[in-house]
Image (cartoon, rainbow, N blue to C red):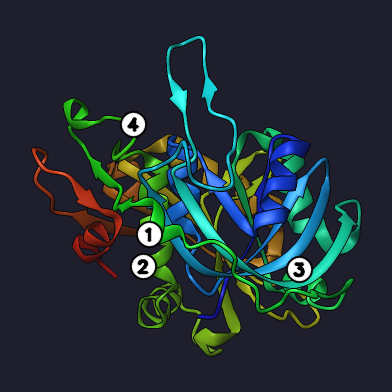
């Protein structure tokens, strides 16, 4: 389905300068940090986001969860919260510089990301996925990087581990093992839906069969005044009008609340919304009987007493389309 493009939010100028100096993005040992780390894949593109400005274009060449978080370069400040939680930056993404620029988000070309930033709590999120139109734009601005071939840090020299997930709260340690929250389920489903064969089946289920799957892209959260769409499927290059498919994800049982939310989203998109579905473990009778949406059950047959890597969970996740 092609490479994705993300803007990675940094909280202060000090952190931004370290990212730019070392060509590395770092994410904290939190659910949002883990979410960004698993969402971004090798081969994807990213820019940094700070103070409503986008910085540079990079290609992801490697990513690791490192154990030596205190000595590893770059040395982001450890955050000690009043709650007693300590945040490190174990999740590292190694980058190859492609283009150099500093661009304001107050431009039409950044509207997809700017709307998310404005409507969904600003920088509380670690990353924002942009569409292919935005990637095409940033691939033409600024200038080619002078250090295009440089990769300065060997992340593997700092020791590394595979973060794991569990539904058992007693196994969570907030460094190596994390709770299986709904945003992780969303990430699992987005990656599953992004596979051509699965996307083709979903398009067929929604009676969208007049275009190739390669003409569509699968994006993460999309903010609207009414809330946020968990997954948005849209045409890569719309001609004349845009066509969108709304996907709501529910970790457990989807009920009237989720149904009403999707109906609101559809109303906001108007005629350009050509289909909608809810992906959940179970559905109430009200949802199943609705003609507004398509219900797609998912299953994740895992042992509640064990921990799993994200790739393990990808293998266990099944969509019934």
Task: Name which quarter of the figure residue 6 lies in.
Answer: bottom right
The residue positioned 37% from the left and 59% from the top of the image is 189
Q: First in sequence: mark 1 or mark 3? A: 3
54 relative to 100, above or below: above
Of labels 1 and 4, the one closer to you: 4
Distance in Å between CA atoms under marks 2 and 3: 23 Å
Q: Position of residue 168 (x, y in %)?
A: 17, 32
Whole-angstrom CA distance, mark 3 to mark 4, is 34 Å
Specify few, some or many for label 2: CA neighbours under 10 Å numbering under 14, 14-19, or 20 or more.
some
Q: Identify the residue under disc 2.
A: 192
Q: Nearer the viewer, mark 1 or mark 3?
A: 3
Residue designated by label 4: 174
Residue pointed to by mark 3: 134
Residue at 89% across / 61% down in the picture? 108
Residue 291 at least partly seen: no
Q: Secondary structure at mark 4?
A: loop
Cβ–Cβ below 8 Å for labels 1 and 2? yes
Image-quadrant location for residue 24: bottom right
If the image is split into quadrants, where does the C terminus sit? bottom left
Secondary structure under the numbered disc 3 in the rendered image: helix
In 3D space, how far apart are the residues under numbered discs 1 and 3 (Cα atoms)? 23 Å
> As rendered, which of 199 and 73 lies closer to the eye?
73
Between disc 3 and disc 4, whose residue precedes? 3
């Amino acid at each position: 389905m092609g490479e994705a493009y993300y803007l990675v939010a940094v909280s202060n100028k000090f952190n931004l300068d370290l990212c730019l100096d070392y060509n590395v993005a770092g994410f904290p040992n939190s659910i949002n940090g883990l979410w960004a780390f698993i969402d971004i894949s090798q081969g994807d593109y990213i820019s940094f986001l700070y103070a409503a400005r986008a910085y540079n274009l990079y290609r992801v060449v490697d990513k690791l969860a490192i154990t030596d978080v205190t000595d590893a370069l770059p040395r982001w400040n450890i955050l000690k919260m009043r709650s007693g939680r300590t945040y490190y930056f174990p999740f590292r993404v190694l980058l190859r510089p492609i283009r150099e620029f500093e661009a304001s988000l107050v431009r039409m070309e950044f509207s997809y990301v700017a709307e998310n930033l404005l409507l969904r709590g600003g920088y509380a999120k670690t990353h924002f996925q942009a569409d292919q139109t935005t990637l095409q734009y940033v691939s033409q601005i600024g200038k080619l990087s002078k250090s295009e071939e440089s990769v300065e840090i060997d992340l593997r020299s700092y020791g590394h581990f595979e973060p794991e997930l569990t539904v058992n709260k007693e196994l969570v340690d907030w460094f190596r093992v994390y709770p299986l929250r709904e945003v992780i389920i969303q990430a699992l489903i987005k990656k599953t839906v992004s596979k051509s064969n699965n996307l083709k089946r979903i398009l067929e289920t929604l009676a969208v069969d007049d275009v190739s799957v390669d003409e569509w892209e699968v994006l993460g959260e999309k903010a609207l005044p009414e809330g946020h769409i968990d997954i948005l499927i849209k045409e890569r290059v719309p001609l004349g009008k845009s066509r969108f498919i709304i996907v709501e994800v529910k970790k457990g049982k989807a009920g009237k609340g989720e149904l009403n939310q999707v109906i609101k989203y559809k109303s906001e998109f108007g005629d350009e919304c050509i289909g909608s579905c809810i992906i959940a473990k179970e559905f109430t009778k009200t949802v199943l009987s609705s003609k507004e949406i398509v219900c797609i059950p998912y299953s994740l047959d895992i042992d509640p007493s064990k921990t799993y890597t994200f790739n393990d969970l990808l293998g266990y996740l099944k969509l019934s389309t």
